[in-house]
């Protein structure tokens, strides 16, 4: 299983799109949700990437 590579930035983007399809979030709120222990626990950089791409 060591050969599997995950693009966490892309996963954060997909999660951001999913959250936006369910509920309205500000960009800051979406980043907070992506980082949250109640959310997906992405790193800040991953959450920012995902939110920025989702809002394009």
Image (cartoon, grey):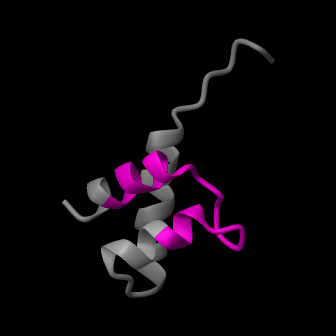
Please give the name of the residue rendered at 38% of the width and 87% of the height, measured from the top-left corner.
24
| Residue 35 pos. (x, y %) | 57, 62
User: Please, what is the dominant secondary structure of the magenta stretch?
Assistant: helix
In this view, the residue farthest toward the left is 56
Give the mark count: 0
Can the viewer see residue 20 in this picture? no
Q: Quadrant of the C terminus?
A: bottom left
| Residue 21 pos. (x, y %) | 41, 77
In this view, the residue farthest toward the right is 1
Pick the front one: 27 or 17: 27
| Residue 14 pos. (x, y %) | 46, 55
Please give the name of the residue rendered at 54% of the width and 39% of the height, measured from the top-left corner.
8
Q: Is residue 15 magenta?
A: no
Pick the front one: 3 or 32: 32
Can the viewer see residue 39 in this picture? yes
| Residue 13 pos. (x, y %) | 42, 53
For the magenta stretch, what is the residue range?
32-51
Say above or below: 54 vs 33.
Answer: above
Q: Is residue 36 magenta?
A: yes
Pick the front one: 36 or 22: 36
Q: Quadrant of the N terminus?
A: top right
Say above or below: 32 vs 56.
Answer: below
Please give the name of the residue rendered at 44% of the width and 66% of the height, measured from the top-left corner.
31
Say above or below: 35 vs 5.
Answer: below
Identify the image quadrant of residue 30. bottom left
Please give the name of the residue rendered at 56% of the width and 49% of the height, measured from the top-left corner.
43
């Amino acid at each position: 299983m060591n050969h599997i590579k995950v693009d966490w930035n892309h996963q954060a983007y997909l999660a951001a799109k999913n959250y936006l399809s369910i509920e309205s979030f500000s960009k800051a709120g979406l980043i907070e949700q992506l980082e949250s222990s109640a959310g997906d626990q992405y790193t800040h950089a991953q959450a920012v990437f995902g939110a920025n791409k989702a809002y394009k």
